[in-house]
Image (cartoon, rainbow, N blue to C red):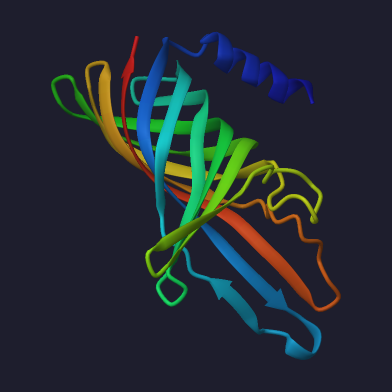
Amino acid sequence: MKKPIILLAVLLTGQTGFAQFGLRLGLNFANQKNEVKYSGEFSGDSDKETYRSLAGPMLTFYYDATIDDNSSFEIGLGYVQRGFKVIDDSEKSVTKAKLSYLYFPVTYKYAYEISDGMKLFGRGGVYLGFGLSGKLVEKYKDDNETSTNTVTHLFGNDEEKNLFKPFDFGMEIGGGLTFNNFEVGIGYDLGLANISVIPKGENFKHIVKNRGFFLMVGMRF
């Protein structure tokens, strides 16, 4: 147990090489996987919801611990908006769920110099998330009238009051270009945690997982 702790301490203190702090700003196109899988008599069957992506902000402060000229570890702390959008033409309704998360990415980064001061990089690792707040808004249009239904308190562990468990984790991959201390890039978050509050039933399991494709710009200082 002591060896991994010592290794992490070495990375965090930058003893493996040069270290820098950085800031990234981005736009996250969030979505969710929402599926009910059946077992028993209906084993193999499933019901899936189809959502549209919902754009929202993301902000990450990170610490870059350099290993060598090409490799480094990044440990971050930030904010990301996740969620989804549903447009039902038959019901003339639009539903948007905006979920605010505290976000902790930990990734390995490899960069290759392609010209003087410019590098092509790729990142891969994991992220942890904790739901801070959320709001689901449903808007219905009937003739010339519009009605709105708003649901808050989305995070929790009570299936009668909440929709999503607050804890989330998953995998993150990305890449882009750096020029001196500036960077542009893209990435994708693949949620692995089932955040549905609905407990597993005798013949079914409800699965909800976060997804997100993002664009970013950043700088190191």
184 to 88, vertically: above or below: above
The residue most toward the right is: 202
Q: Residue at x 74, y 69 (%)?
A: 205
Please indicate whether residue 95 sits to the left or right of residue 200 in the image. Answer: left
Residue 159 in the figure: left or right of residue 221: right
Between residue 58 and residue 9, name the one nearer to us.
58
> Between 160 and 37, which is closer to the camera in this rendering?
160
Q: Quadrant of the C terminus?
A: top left
Q: Residue 101: x, y in percent?
A: 58, 35
Q: Residue at x 49, y 35 (%)?
A: 80
Residue 121 point in image, percent of width and height: 31, 34
Pick the quarter of the image with the N terminus. Answer: top right
Q: Is residue 9 above or below residue 95?
A: above
**Residue 117 vertical position relative to residue 194 in the rendered view, above or below:** above
Left or right of residue 182, residue 154 in this image:
right
Task: Kindly give the residue lying farthest to the front in the view shown.
Answer: 144
Q: Residue at x 77, y 61 (%)?
A: 198
Q: Residue at x 39, y 70 (%)?
A: 143
Q: Nearer the viewer, residue 37 or 146?
A: 146
- Relative vertical location of residue 43 with respect to residue 27 in this rendering, above or below: below
Residue placed furthest toward the left: 115
Q: Quadrant of residue 34?
A: bottom right
Residue 133 falls in which quadrant of the image? top right
Across and down, in percent, residue 138 comes to 52, 57
